[in-house]
Image: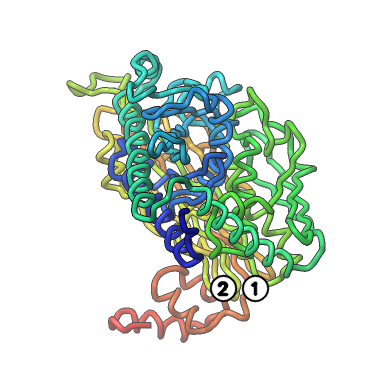
Amino acid sequence: MTKTPSSVAYQVMWNRLISVVEEQAQALVRTAFSTSVREAGDLSAGVYDTQGRMLAQAVTGTPGHVNAMADAVAHFIRRIGRENMFEGDIYITNDPWEGTGHLHDITMVTPSFHRGALVGFFACTAHIVDIGGRGFGADAASVYEEGLYLPIMKFAERGTVDATLLRIVRGNVREPDQLVGDMYALATCNDIGHRRLIEMMVEFGLTDLDGIADFILENSRRATLERIAALPRMSAEGEMTVDGFDVPITLKVKVTVHEDRIVSDFAGTSGVDKKGINCPLVYTKAYACYALKVAIAPEIPNNHASLLPFEVTAPENTIVHALHPAPVALRHIVGHFVPDTVFNAFDQIVPGLVPAEGAGCLCNFQVSLRPRSDAPAPKGARRVEVLTFNSGGAGARPGLDGLNATAFPSGVMTMPIEATEHAGPVIIWRKELRPDSGGAGKTRGGLGQHMEVGAMEGYEFDIQAMFDRGAHPARGRRGGGNGAPTLIAQDDGTAMRVKGKQFVPHGRRVVMAFPGGAGYGPVADRDPASLRRDLARGYISAQTAAEVYGLSADEIAAVEAAVLRGEDI
């Protein structure tokens, strides 16, 4: 009879599983073709039991991908059928409603067999730069226009890749080598996870994952419920208005704490938009769960059981529960505002815990470059798609300033200039922190960024803007000031919209200022040393130091003199 492992042994195995999926994710980073994965970390990786329950997730990755992918494997099991699963199989989809929310995310699932028996699954997701259609942006009127749809199907059966699928993919996208390369990278990282899992099972003498799965899920469930049980039994409502595409969007949520669960109900939220900023419920759920989990149980590992007590509901055909065939390409814009909306409610339940509002959604743009049309173009000029991820400022925390140019809640990294310029004939003329963009307060909001982009000589381009916070900047909490709004225009002053595809002629540049996070607490309570440090570092101007924070002319002059002398402030 096989001896049941001790709780200590199970804890070691749990830690090993987390390291396995982190190696899985890092393999994807190293092998991916898309800069969004390789440079920005827009991905997820995880291991699942035979029932499709997530046991462990990689640290590298985004909450939207991971928490949405937590539900995806069950769809794969249902669609493929256990009787049709074989060693060497690999499954694929970019279904927005059974994957992670839009066509630009490809999810791969690989069944893991040990000694001829199915023991679990590995899954991973990556954002790809192009999937055909109109391109990455909000301009489509339905999901059919947004790109190539891949239903849950087999990418490979018994080790043989579906060549017909690859021909269809290549015939429908602008960057076929890049996309197919990313597909193979996804498949490879799952295989690495599988190999490491089998090594662990052999080392510990396991024939299946049932025991370790029960240990992980039971301990996670109990720990999460203990945190929920310690909260006040009450409800509170939160609300936020953001720019939207043509008209503003209002997000509303009622958060109710029960003894054994927390329910977030988005009744009252704006309806489905005509453009592609709608959000499937799976993505809304991912970020609503994330907001509450980081607020009350941040150190409990993410898995099926630790997510289960966070329930999310929303009426159908609201912008947070968009149904097929609504356009959803930029579902992340609405999804990234969900945590701040939930925090606006939760702050009334547990005061002094959650941060002020931040920039929210990523400050992404995609540049579609082509040879100039108003004059002869350089020999060899070609069409190129360049996607870059950037960030505004995070909201101030109750005891700490907000992080500058940091993507909360997504956690996606800002892409380096060198990587962006290497991807195509694009020039980043300016990329720096934006002074005075962080909201004032006892703790200051994180700074946004200034950015200026153009094309090399002989090229014109379309820029696909994916911004928000133009008319609705981040709001301060508990007396803190608002963050600065988003600004975008051509370098000759021509106004531009915060969303949508817009033409930029040869020789012109696009000048952008990304939003800052809001402040927390009264400005009068700001620590004087922190205020002087902000002035010395250029985070605030002398004018803001005087007019907003009340610093005297002599105090400002003293700081400026110290900076000139090279003194540390």
Q: Secondary structure at mark 2?
A: loop
Q: Given the image, on which type of amino acid does mark 1 rest? A: Gly
Q: Residue at x 69, y 36 (%)?
A: 321
Residue 473 in sight here: no
Dividing the picture into quadrants, the one containing residue 160 is top left
Using the image, tell me which numbered label, if any, was put on residue 58.
Answer: none
Dividing the picture into quadrants, the one containing residue 510 is top left
**Quadrant of the image for the C terminus?**
bottom left
- Which is nearer the eye, 567 or 199? 199
Task: Spot the residue most to the right.
Answer: 234
Compared to 521, does 100 lie above or below?
A: above
Residue underneath mark 1: 521
Using the image, tell me which numbered label, if any, was put on residue 443.
Answer: 2
Q: Position of residue 335 (x, y in %)?
A: 60, 44
Q: Position of residue 565 (x, y in %)?
A: 28, 83
Measure the alpha-carbon separation of dots 2 and 1: 7 Å
Compared to 333, does 501 lie above or below?
A: above
Task: Spot the residue most to the left.
Answer: 379
Left or right for 487, reference 33:
right
Q: Residue at x 54, y 70 (%)?
A: 444
Q: Given the image, on which type of amino acid does mark 2 rest? A: Thr
Q: Residue at x 60, y 27 (%)?
A: 327
Answer few, some or many: residues within 10 Å of disc 1's Cα (few below 14, many 20 plus, some between 14 and 19): many
Answer few, some or many: residues within 10 Å of disc 2's Cα (few below 14, many 20 plus, some between 14 and 19): many
- Which is nearer the eye, 321 or 209? 209
Q: Position of residue 512 (x, y in %)?
A: 45, 46
